[in-house]
Image (cartoon, rainbow, N blue to C red):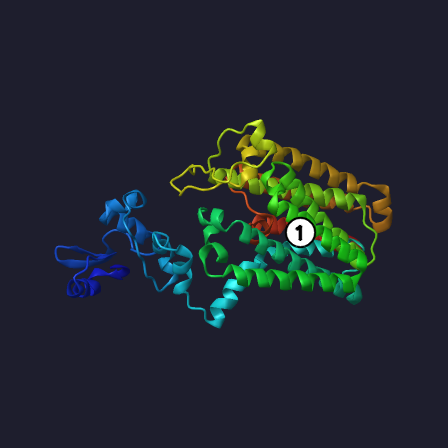
Amino acid sequence: MVSASVDAYLAPVAAALGVELVCSRLEYVDGKFTGHFAGSNCNGEQKVSALYEHFPELASASETGLRVEVYGNSSADYAMLELASANKDAHFNDFVPFTPAVRLKNLLRLLRIQQYLKNCFVFIPIFFAGRIFDLESLGRAAACFVVFCCIASFIYVLNDLQDIESDRQHPYKRFRPLAYGTMLPKVAVAVAVLLVLCGGLISYALSPLCALLALAYVLLNLAYVYYIKSIALFDICCVAIGFNLRVFAGAVACDIPISAWLVLMVFLLSMFLVTGKRWDDLSRTKAPKPTPATVTAPAPASTSTEADTAEPKVQLRRSLYGYNKDFALSTLTFLSAINTVCYILYTMDASVLARLNSPYLYMTALWVVLGNLRYLQNIFVFKQGFSPTKVLLHDRGLAFCLVGWLISMMAIIYF
């Protein structure tokens, strides 16, 4: 019997059943309970660790033919279920309490609604055009936002279906619904079809050109999921182009001409943020020395490495075999400099100043410089890199810079 409950309760039960007991144990000193555990709380992955200590032969179960059967009744038992030698998909799904609330939670996690923040790029054209308070333009941009939320979730579902097995070997991605077993693949496929249909219909209602841009985004990301994400450099370019497609779609939906400056800055900013995420991926794993073959072609699917720390083995994103931390840091510095210079040139462009009718646009460059420095500080000093979404959700320094830039730009454009 393996449980997170304490031995004071379970020892009599285990004795009556005639089974061995692995559980959380209370600490006693001189016969008195100290209020602490004697060791770790036997919960989640600690159950597996405690079981290995109690039965060392489990480490070679696959070689000796030792049969392992596991029954669990809570999400804390998933680590134990991974030990089961029988069909693990059946084990993962047999005990999950599929209440409406649990189904909704799993669905929202599958859709990755926290990533919808990226789709706010569709509002950039109306913001710079001075039409953010125009209800018709705002409504059309909001509809375009919904389109990209639908097709982005569609891509995330396809990506998770493609990577179920590799995600199960990852210390963080293994908790995604499909890899974790809390969502059936056939249900995920049905959700994906519904999402892409909704996105396509809404985009066509906005305009045929908007629908074409949405289709281009889908095709680009399908290429990314099934091939490009395995090729270094092309993978980050693909993600950056996706951000630009959002901006183009927002401009088309509201019939707004788009500036070359805007396209350049969005592309460079996206490249910068995605490279930071690659650095974070590399910092969590220890990639082998790349060769020209691994840079230009997908690495074998079975390749895996040890983490730098005591984390479990992780199957690397295959494109990471074309990167290392030094290259990622150099690329970040390079992109940060180009992005900053590009923005400063934008603030001094005569046509831009004439359109905005303000000589003070250059003052907003302060926030761009501070934001770039803050992101580099996270990488170089605090050794932290995040996805573009987590950057804004979890870093107060960068959020402060963004808010400061927004207030400054609104004051210049709208007042």
The image position of residue 254, as x and y in percent, is 80, 59
- Answer few, some or many: residues within 10 Å of disc 1's Cα (few below 14, many 20 plus, some between 14 and 19): some
Q: Position of residue 233 (x, y in %)?
A: 63, 36
Q: Quadrant of the N terminus?
A: bottom left
Quarter occupied by residue 321: top right
Q: Secondary structure at mark 1?
A: helix
- Looking at the rendered image, the quarter that the C terminus falls into is bottom right
Q: Residue at x 24, y 45 (%)?
A: 56
**Residue tagged 1:** 404
Direction from residue 352 to residue 154 in the image, left or right: left
Farthest residue, direction left: 30
Residue at the spot 66% in from the left edge and 36% down from the top edge: 335
Asked if 102 appears above or below 319 in the picture, the reply is below
Residue 411 seen from this side: no
- Of the pair 187 and 393, the residue shown nearer to us: 187
Q: Is 338 above or below relative to 54?
A: above
Q: Position of residue 128 (x, y in %)?
A: 78, 53
